Structure formats: C-alpha cells, structure tokens
C-alpha cells in the first residue's frame, strides 16, 4: 500500500511539472497587448480579444495578502474599462477558486488542454509536396497536396495578409482589435509554422504551429463555415504536426473550449489525449468569444 501511495505521489509531481511546462510555453505562444508583473501575478490586457490574453495568470510566489492583490487587479481592469478575469489552473490552490466564487466571480470558458506524443501521431498522409527554397530558410515546403485537390500552403512567418484573412475567418471586426492584434501575433518570440488553404485566392482554412522546447502548439485553427466537413481542418493540423516533427518536435499540445465536440473529435483522431482542464473566473459578464 505504501508503494502505491509513493508511486501516486511521484506521478502527481511529474504531472504537475508537465502542466507547468505547458502553461509556460502557452504563455510564450500567445502574447498580450500589455503585461504587468505584480508580485508573482501576470496581469494581461488585450482589449478582450481572448480570455487568455486578458486575464490574471499566477506564475510565481506571492508576498502580498491575496485580498489586497485581488483589489489591485480589479482596479487595474477598471482603469482599462474591462471586467477582471482570473485564470484557474490545476496548479493553483483550490481555495483561491473558492475565494473568487465567494466574491461573485462566475466561471467562463472551461478549456481542455490536450497533448500528443509524436509516437502516437495518427498522420493524414499527403500525396505530394513542392519544395521551393527561394526566400525561405525554414525548410518548410511551399505546399502539401492531399486527396480531393486539397492544398495546404506554408509560410515561415506571420504576414499581414494572413492575419487579415484570419480576421475574416474568426469574425474579428472591432477596429481596435484589428489594430492591436497584428502586433500581438508578430510579438510571438518562437519559430512559427503558418498554414492555410485557399480557394480562388481566398483563405478558407488556417492554422498556426508554434515551436518551443521540443513541443509544437496548435493555434488559430479555423475553417470557413462554407467549407467544413471536407477534411480541411485535418489537413491543416496534420500538416503542421508533420512539419514540426521534422523540425524535432517530439510532443504537441492544444487548447479547446469544452463543448466544441467537432474539434475535440478531430484532435482525438490525430492522437491527442486530455491532460488537464482550466477555466476563468470573471467578475462581470463578457461577450462570448470563439477565439479562446
């Protein structure tokens, strides 16, 4: 019995260490418009583009009393004229979540984090590729070809045209967001794999792979409503994962809002498995977003 308890404890410590790693590299992958470090808490602000980039994330030990820190965060977001949001992960003491609940903070955007060991990757095989190295130093192909004349195009950097097309796919129309979000994408400090599918010169599917510490994170996976159920999402994800594996990634991760059954089914079919769940505590209601 003692051996079982010890094994369970060691497994828990190892699991928490891996969750901490995923939390760190996902912070690197998704910069905010403004960030303030306050006594071990990151106060992130991005005009409500996403909950992740507009919330308080705990990254270090605290010295200031918790109630005082919460009041400070509330004052910061009040100055920004936005609700205060706290991210709740399994790494936090459950009493903090209970404290926020008692202060009237409601749960929003329960998010499931999934990971993939590349040994378990169920690849969607491409049937052709073109490698044109002019103007590239990333080793990425110009495109991969899939059945039904599906072509996944690659870029080794995030361009203004790609971001503009992404806004159309995810419905971003707010002028402030269209002004600041491009700088957030371009502030990503890690190597990126930028993928898209076009029909008649118009982007109908997108994807972004972000490399960090032997991992690739899948972000910005969108398919135009008129082009769903054609395998475009599978082609985009599989292409990014395949190219990331060639670059040395041994694992992958992604984040999907709970209840997105279609996306969850796709990711599971590629070999992803659930690792942990996090959510946000919000003081006041926010418009629901599809971008988290």
Image (cartoon, rainbow, N blue to C red):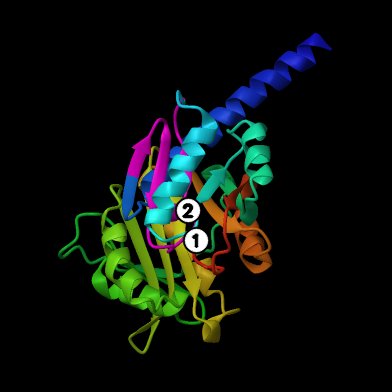
> Which residue is outermost to the bottom?
200
Crowding at mark 1 (Cα within 10 Å: few <14, some 14-19, many 20+) = many
Q: Nearer the viewer, mark 1 or mark 2?
A: 2
The answer to whether the residues at label 1 and label 2 have Cβ atoms under 8 Å apart is no
Q: Percent x, y for residue 41?
A: 43, 36
The reply to whether residue 215 is in sight is no
Q: Earlier in the sequence, mark 1 or mark 2?
A: 2
Q: Which residue is mark 1?
A: 238
Residue 247 is a magenta residue: no
Question: Which label sits on residue 7?
Answer: none
- Give the distance between the C-alpha atoms of the residues marked 1 and 2, in whole angstroms: 25 Å
Where 264 falls versus 200 (above or below)? above
The quadrant of the rendering that contains the N terminus is: top right
Where 279 falls versus 193 (above or below)? above
Q: Secondary structure at mark 2?
A: helix
* Residue 52 located left or right of residue 130: right
Q: Percent x, y for residue 55?
A: 47, 50
* Residue 27 located left or right of residue 289: left
Q: Which residue is mark 2?
A: 52
Q: Percent x, y for residue 78?
A: 43, 55
The residue positioned 29% from the left and 65% from the top of the image is: 180
Q: Secondary structure at mark 1?
A: helix
- Quarter of the figure with residue 140: bottom left
> Which residue is outermost to the left?
135
The residue positioned 30% from the left and 47% from the top of the image is: 190
Residue range of the region highlighted in magenta in the rendering: 36-61
The residue positioned 58% from the left and 57% from the top of the image is: 256
Residue 47 is a magenta residue: yes
């Amino acid at each position: 019995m003692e051996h079982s308890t010890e094994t369970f404890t060691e497994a828990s410590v190892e699991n928490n260490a891996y969750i901490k790693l995923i939390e760190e590299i996902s912070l690197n992958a998704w910069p905010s418009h403004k960030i303030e470090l306050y006594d071990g808490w990151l106060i992130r602000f991005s005009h409500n583009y996403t909950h992740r980039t507009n919330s308080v994330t705990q990254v270090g030990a605290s010295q200031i009393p918790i109630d005082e820190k919460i009041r400070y965060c509330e004052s910061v977001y009040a100055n920004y004229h936005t609700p205060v949001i706290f991210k709740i992960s399994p790494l936090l003491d459950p009493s903090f979540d209970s404290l926020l609940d008692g202060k009237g903070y409601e749960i929003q955007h329960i998010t499931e984090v999934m990971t993939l060991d590349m040994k378990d990757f169920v690849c969607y095989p491409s049937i052709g590729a073109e490698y044109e190295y002019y103007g590239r130093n990333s080793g990425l192909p110009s495109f991969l070809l899939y059945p039904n004349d599906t072509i996944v195009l690659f870029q080794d950097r995030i361009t203004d045209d790609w971001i503009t097309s992404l806004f159309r796919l995810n419905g971003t129309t707010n002028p402030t967001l269209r002004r600041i979000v491009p700088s957030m994408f371009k502030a990503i400090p890690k190597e990126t794999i930028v993928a898209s599918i076009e029909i008649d010169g118009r982007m109908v599917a997108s994807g972004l792979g972000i490399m960090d510490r032997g991992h690739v994170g899948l972000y910005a996976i969108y398919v135009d409503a008129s082009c769903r159920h054609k395998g475009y999402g599978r082609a985009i994800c599989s292409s990014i994962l395949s190219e990331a594996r060639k670059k040395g990634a041994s694992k992958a991760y992604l984040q999907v809002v709970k209840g997105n059954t279609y996306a969850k089914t796709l990711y599971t079919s590629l070999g992803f498995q659930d690792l942990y769940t996090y959510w946000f505590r919000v003081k006041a209601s926010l418009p629901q977003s599809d971008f988290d």
